[in-house]
Image: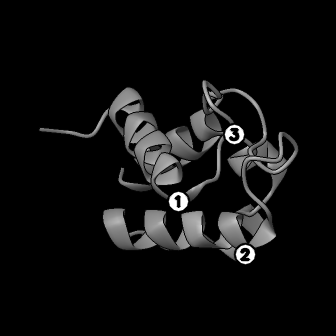
Amino acid sequence: MDLTVDQCADAIVDYVASFAILEPGQEIPRDQSLLETGILDSFGIVELITFLESEYDIVIADEDMTKEKLGSVQKMAEYTVGALG
């Protein structure tokens, strides 16, 4: 079974929820920057990138680490699924 963007986004949200400190009732947005919303700091973003690389056996090039390509959960999921071919 091929990984869908929604499945990947769900996995990212689950991973972030496992270590991010959230306010009661706070949800992890799929279409906003986790850095800009304060859900993750720069170290958390690095941990998330490492998770994606190890979980899906991909390499995210330094030049791809931009807001345009990885700036939200949705964009990260789309990038990851695209990297899987």
Label located before the other in sequence (1 or 3): 1
Give the percent coordinates (x, y) of residue 34.
74, 45
Query: Which amino acid does the dot numbered 3 rest on?
Result: Ser
> Split into 4 quadrants, where in the image is the N terminus?
top left
Give the percent coordinates (x, y) of residue 2.
20, 39
Q: CA distance from mark 1 to mark 2?
A: 24 Å
Relative to 46, 35 lies left or right: right
Quarter holding residue 45: bottom right
Residue assigned mark 1: 19
Q: Nearer the viewer, residue 28 or 6?
A: 28
Marks 3/2 in contact by CB < 8 Å: the verdict is no
Q: Which residue is found at the position 58% from the left and 66% from the top?
A: 49
Mark 1 surroundings: few (<14), some (14-19) or many (≥20) residues within 10 A: few
Q: Tell me the element at label 3.
A: loop
Q: Which residue is found at the position 53% from the left and 59% from the top?
A: 19
Relative to 73, 62 lies left or right: right
Q: Which residue is found at the position 38% from the left and 44% from the top?
A: 11
Marks 1/2 in contact by CB < 8 Å: the verdict is no
Q: Colour mode?
A: one colour
Image depth: mark 3 or mark 2 in front: 3
Quarter holding residue 36: top right
Mark 2 surroundings: few (<14), some (14-19) or many (≥20) residues within 10 A: few
Task: Say whether residue 35 is visible.
Answer: yes
Marks 1/3 in contact by CB < 8 Å: the verdict is no
Q: Which mark is residue 65?
A: none
Residue assigned mark 3: 72
Residue assigned mark 2: 62
Farthest residue to the front: give it: 24
Give the percent coordinates (x, y) of residue 17.
50, 46
